[in-house]
Image (spheres, rainbow, N blue to C red):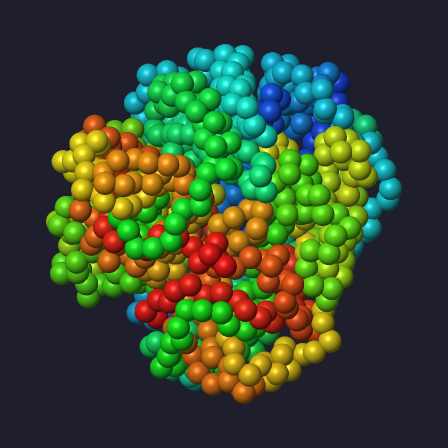
Amino acid sequence: MLFESEAQSAMDTAVARGATYADVRFGVVRDEHLEVRNGVVNGFSDSESRGFSVRALVDGAWGFASSASLDKREVDRIAALAVEVARASAKVKDKGIEVLPAGKQVGTFKTPFEIDPNDVSVNERLTFLLDVEAEVRAAKGVTVGRAWMDAWRTTKEFASTEGSRISQELLQCGSACEALAVGSGDVQDRLFPGTCGLYQTGGYEIVKKAGLPANARRTGEEAVALLTAEQCPSGTMDVILSGDQVSLQIHESIGHALELDRVLGWEANFSGTSFATLDKLGTFKYGSPIVNVVCDMTCPLAFATHGFDDEGTPAKSVYLIKDGILVGYMAGRDTAMAANVDLCGCVRAEYWGRLPMIRIGNVNLQPGTTPLAELFDGVKNGVYMESNRSWSIDDKRLNFQFGCQLGYEIKNGKKGKMLKNPTYAGMTPKFWGSCDAIGDKDAWVAWGTPNCGKGEPMQTARSCQGASPSRFRNVDVGVVSYAR
Amino acid sequence: MLADLAADRAAADAVLDIALEESKADETEIVLSSQELALSRITHNVIHENLVERDRNLNVRAVVGNRVGVASTNALDRDGIRIAVARAIEIARVSPVDKEFPGLPSAGAATQPMDWAYDAPTAALTADERAAAVAAIVRVMAGHKLTAAGYVSTGNSSIAIANSKGVRQFFRSTDSAINIKAMGEDSSGYAEGYSRRFADLDAAALGEKAAKRAIAGRSPGSVDPGEYTVILEPPAFREYLVYLSWTGFGAMPFSEGASFMTGHIGDRIIGNNVTIADDFAHPAGAGMPFDFEGVPRQPVPLIDQGIARGVVYDSYYAAKMKHANTGHALPAPNTVGPLPLNIVVKPGAKSADELVRETKRGLLVCRTWYIRLVDKLQTIITGMTRDGFFLIEDGEVVRGLRNMRFNESIIGSLGRCELAKELVRSESHVIPACKIDGFRFSSGTTF
C-alpha cells in the first residue's frame, strides 16, 4: 500500500484513544470532463484531489473525519478527531451500533479496460465531440447542440484494525450528445444514448461503443419533430418502456427502496424511508413472477463494479427480488444484522473525504425471454416511451410520476405517430406487478447513472441499473395539467 | 494550512500569488476555496452519523488567445499548483477558439465587506456542542413519545479569487443549520433553522415545532385529487420557487428562448403582489459579495410587482448579450450559465396565521419532496407533499392528511397567490409562506 505507514499511524492513534474499531481510506481521484456546445468548448476540466478519512467506532457509536492534508501530524489529528466525534455520538445513543465482522480482507482490484483514455490525445477527443455536436445541429431547427464525455480514475486504499489492506484502481467513462429545440411555443430536448448517456466501468472503448456519430443527427431531428408532435393522450393503457427508462424506474422504485439504511430510517429526514419494510422480506409480492432483480457488484462493465466496497466488503451478487418476491436488501456491516441479509459490497463514499453509506450498486433487472420486436405484439392501445426527462417519487418510494423525452403511439401492435410529453404514473408494487414482458439479453444494457444523490451532507454516487425494454399493462398515462 | 486558508486572507493570497506566478497563459484566474463541514445526523433519537470533513480546491482557468482551459487540484504545495496550472494551459492550447469569449473580467467596483457573515464561535463549535443540541431535540421528542431524524450542522468556509487582470477577492463565512423531522406512528412534522450564527438557532424550539406538527397529523385522513387552495410554508415554497431559477432566471436559457422570461421583459407574467429578486446581501441570507469570477454581485430585480424585469449574467453572457454583468458566474467550467443563488421574495401584508384563518377550505403544505420539471416553458412541476400535510376548514387546521402528488405551473400559480408577511431563510433563500388558489393535486399515496 502506498499509504501503509500513514494508515497504521491513524489506526494506532484511534485505538490508543479508545476506538474498538477503525478504518482508514486514502484516495486520489482524477476527473476529466469535456463538453462542447454549439461549436465551442463549453467545459473542459481536469481535476485531481487527494486525501484521507478515518472512521472510528467508540462505545458503540461512529465518528468520522477527513482531510486533504497528508502530513503525519494531520493524519494523527484527524484520527483523534474521529474518536472525539464518536465519543460525542455516544452521548446520544441507545443500545449502540454493532458491526458485522468483515474479517481480514487483503486484496487488489483493477477495472479491466481496453483503451486508456490518457492514450487518446486531447485533440482526438475534442475533434470527436465537435464532430458529433455538429451532426446534432445538422438537423434543421436545433437551437442548441451538446456533446460530452467523462473519465473518472480513482486510486483508493483501505486499511482496518481487523487487518484488512485493500488497493483498488477504478476507471469509469461515459459520453452523450443532446439536442435542444425551441419553437412553436415549446421547448423540447433529446439526449442520446439513454437518459444520461452511456456510462460504464472501462476505458475509452465505452465512449467509442456509445454510437454517438451514427445517432447524433437523429437525436437532433427528433428534438425538432417533438415541437410539433401530438400531445401524449391521458388514460389507462399499456406502456412499453425503453431499456434506459426501465433503468430509471428500477433506480427510483427498487434501488432506493431496498437500501437497508433507508428501510431502517437512517435517511428519514432527507431521502426518506421505504415501503419495503423488514416484515415484507421473503413474502412480499414486489412484482410479477418474471421480475428478477440482483445487486451484482461484480457485473462486467456495470458502472458500480469494484473489487471491494468502502468498508472492506468483497463485491458479490445478491438477489433483491426473485420471481417477483422481495428477498433481499442492499446492506452495510452495521445494518445487515437487522434483516439477516448477505452483504454484497455496496457501501460507498463519493470520494476519500466522505462518509461511506449504502448506495445503489449495480441493481440489475435480469433479462427476460421476449425478443424486442415481440414486445409490441398484443398491445392494442398503448404508448412506447423512451429516455427520462422528469422523475419524481414519494419518500417511501411508492407513488411515482415519470416523464419521458419521446413517445410513440402503439395501435394493434404497431408503432404509430410520435407523441410529445409522455408521462406515466403509478404505485410501485402495482406497477411492477403489471410487467408481463421483459426484453431478452440481446436488448439488455448495463445503464449507468452518474448523479445519484443521497445523505446529509448530500453525496453523489455512480450507480447502474441494467435493463431491457419492458412492457407494463394498464398504466396511468398522461398528466392532468396538460388537459386543463 | 487548511485552517489558515479558511480564516486568514494572507495565507490564501500566498497560494494565489504562487499560482499566478506559475502561469504563462495570456490570462489566468485562480479560485481557491476551503471548507470545513461538521454535521451530526440523527435517527430514532440517536446520533447515527457524525462527521467533520475538511477539503480545499484550487481552480485554475487559463486563457490562451480565445481558448480556455480549466484544471483543479487540492494539492497546494508548489508542485501541485504548478501541475494544475500547466494542465489548464495545455487544455486551453488544444481547445478550439471561442470567438465570443470576452476575456477574464477586470477589477471593478469595490465589494461589500460583509464581515458579519463570519462568526468565530460557530467556526469553533465542537462535536460535544452539536451533541448537546441533539440531546435537547431528543428530550423534546421523548416528552412527546416521538422520535427525531435530521441533523445539526456547522460550516466554515472561505473563497479567494485572483486573476491576472487585477481582480483580487477574499470572503470567509460560517453557516449552521438544524433540520428536524419528528416521527410518530402514522405522522411526521418538520422544522428547520438556518443562520450564520449557531447561537441564533434554538434546537429545543425547533424540536417543539416539528413535534407539534407530528402530533397534529396523527390518524391522517385523505382528500380526493383535485384543485385546492393551499398554503405552502417556506420550506415548501422554497423548493417550489427554486425551479424558476433553474428554468428561467439565468441568461443562458433566456438567450436561447428556453426561459419563461424570454420575450416577456416588461410584461406582467404573474400577480402584481409578487416581487422576486436575487439579493446576496440580505441580512438573513447566505450570499457572498462576489461571484466565482470575482465580480461584485449586484442585487437583481427578476420580477417586480408581477412584471418580468430581467435575468442574471456573468461575464460571458453579459458580453454576448450586451448587458451589464450582474456578478452571477458559477465556478468554471460552467456549463449551465449564470444563476441566481439568493432568491428573496418581498413579503405580503398578512401573517401566515391570518392566511390560514381566511381559508374556508384548503390544504396546508409544510414540506415538499422530489419536485421535478415536467414542462420547461410552462414551468409545470410535479412533486409530493411530506412531513406535515393538513386540511384547513373554516380557518382552522382540522386534521392531518395522507400525502399527495401535485402537478402545477409555477408561473401560472403565482398569478393567483397571496404572500405572508414573515420572511424566513430556507437554505440559501429568504421567503415567506405563500397561499395559492386552485392548486392541482393529481393523486394520493398510502401514508
The quadrant where residue A47 appears: top right
Where is residue A437 drawn, in percent x and y?
18, 42
| Rendering coords of residue A151 (x, y %) | 45, 26
In the rendered structure, the answer to whether residue A367 lies left or right of residue B152 reads left
Q: Is residue B203 above or below residue B266?
A: below
The image shows residue A369, relative to residue B308, as above or below, that is above
Residue A358 on image: x %, y %: 33, 50
The number of discs equals 0
Q: Residue at x 35, y 38 (%)?
A: A408
Q: Residue at x 18, y 42 (%)?
A: A378
Res. B27 in view? yes
Relative side of B420 to A6, left or right: right
Task: Name the image quarter holding the N terminus of chain A.
Answer: top left
* Residue at point 42%, 63% (across, down): B442
Residue A93 can be seen, yes or no: no
Residue in view at x 74 percent, y 52 percent:
B267
Q: Nearest the camera: B203 or B21?
A: B203
Q: Is residue A54 above or below residue A29?
A: below
Name the foreground residue: A241 vs B351: A241
Q: Nearer the viewer, residue A409 or A64?
A: A409
Can you give x and y, in whole percent of width and height, for residue B120 in the image? 69, 59
Q: State the residue lying farthest toward the right.
A: B109
